Image (cartoon, rainbow, N blue to C red):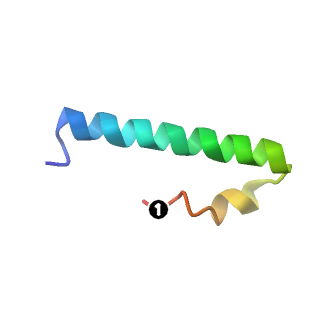
Amino acid sequence: AVNSPEDRTRWEARGTAAARMRRLMREDLGVGPLAERHSPLIDE
């Protein structure tokens, strides 16, 4: 079930990792919200 604590932890960890990766990419490339809006990592 999606509501299980294990799944919730997995989704939160995945979201945190994706957010961290987007932040790193943004810093490395010096780009703003445009890259975040079109990022393939956002697939919710």
Which of the 4 quarters of the picture holds residue 39? bottom right
Residue at image coords 86%, 49%: 30
**Rendered residue at 46%/43% (across/down):** 15
The secondary structure type at the circle numbered 1 is loop
Q: Is residue 19 left or right of residue 15?
A: right
Q: Quadrant of residue 23?
A: top right
Q: Is residue 27 above or below residue 37?
A: above
On-image quarter of the C terminus: bottom left
Residue at the extreme right: 30
- Tell me where residue 9 appears, x and y as whole percent: 31, 34
- Compared with 13, 43 (above or below) is below
Q: Position of residue 17 (x, y in %)?
A: 52, 39
Q: Residue at x 65, y 47 (%)?
A: 22
**Vertical placement of residue 38 versus 2, above or below:** below
- For label 1, the residue is 43
Q: Residue furthest left?
A: 1
Q: Residue at x 79, y 53 (%)?
A: 32
**Residue 38: x %, y % from top left:** 64, 66
What is the three-letter code of the residue carrying label 1? Asp
Q: How many tags in the picture? A: 1
41 relative to 12, above or below: below
User: Neighbour class for label 1 at 10 Å: few (<14), some, many (≥20)?
Assistant: few
On screen, residue 31 versus residue 36, left or right, reads right
